[in-house]
Image (cartoon, rainbow, N blue to C red):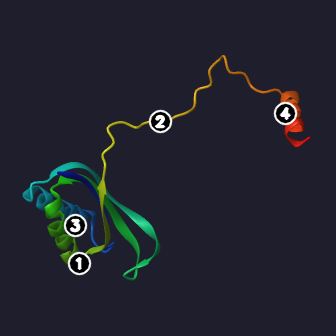
C-alpha cells in the first residue's frame, strides 16, 4: 500500500454536517477498498483566492490514508461523481517518520577563520 493525501473543496452551500457526511462517505469508500485511514482534518470554511464554479468560498477538507495503487482510479472516479466537490487534489506522498533538521556543515575548533590581511595578501599574490 502507498501513502496518499486527499485535499478537496466542497460547495459552501452545504452545512458542516453535510460536508462531514461527504467526508465520511469517502472514508468508508477508502476502507471498503482495503485502505487504512491515517489522519483527517475537520472541514473548515475558507475564502477562495479566485472563483471556482462561481463560488468565492468553500469548505476545505484534508485526509491522509494508505491505499493499494490499483484502487486509486476507483477513488478518483468516486470523487469525480460527487458533484458537491468543487476541486480535489490526490497526492502520492512519502510519510516522514520524523522531521529531520537540515544538515549543517560543522566547523571544527581547529579550523580558524581567515584574517582580512591574509585574504588581501592572497589576492595580491593571485592578481599581482
| Mark earlier in primary sequence (1, 3) | 3
Q: Secondary structure at mark 4?
A: helix
The answer to which quarter of the image holds residue 122 is: top right
Q: Secondary structure at mark 2?
A: loop
Judged left or right of residue 46, residue 85 is left
Q: Is residue 45 visible?
A: yes
Inter-mark Cα distance, 3 to 4: 73 Å
| Mark earlier in primary sequence (2, 3) | 3
Residue drawn where x is 88% and y is 34% of the image: 120
Name the residue carrying label 1.
Answer: 83
Residue drawn where x is 50% and y is 37% of the image: 102
Q: Secondary structure at mark 1?
A: loop
| Mark earlier in primary sequence (1, 2) | 1
Label at residue 122: 4
Residue drawn where x is 27% and y is 67% of the image: 15
Name the residue carrying label 2.
Answer: 101
Q: Secondary structure at mark 3?
A: helix
Inter-mark Cα distance, 4 to 2: 36 Å
Outermost residue toward the top in this view: 110
Front label number (1 vs 3): 1
The answer to which quarter of the image holds residue 111 is: top right
**Residue 128 picture location, percent across and down:** 92, 40
Amino acid at each position: 500500500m502507498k501513502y496518499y493525501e486527499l485535499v478537496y473543496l466542497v460547495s459552501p452551500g452545504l452545512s458542516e454536517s453535510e460536508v462531514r457526511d461527504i467526508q465520511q462517505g469517502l472514508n468508508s469508500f477508502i476502507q471498503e477498498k482495503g485502505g487504512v485511514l491515517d489522519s483527517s482534518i475537520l472541514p473548515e470554511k475558507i475564502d477562495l483566492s479566485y472563483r471556482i464554479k462561481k463560488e468565492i468560498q468553500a469548505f476545505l477538507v484534508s485526509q491522509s490514508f494508505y491505499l493499494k495503487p490499483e484502487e486509486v482510479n476507483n477513488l478518483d472516479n468516486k470523487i469525480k461523481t460527487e458533484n458537491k466537490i468543487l476541486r480535489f487534489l490526490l497526492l502520492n506522498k512519502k510519510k516522514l517518520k520524523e522531521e529531520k533538521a537540515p544538515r549543517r556543515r560543522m566547523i571544527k575548533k581547529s579550523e580558524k577563520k581567515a584574517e582580512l590581511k591574509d585574504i588581501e595578501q592572497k589576492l595580491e599574490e593571485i592578481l599581482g
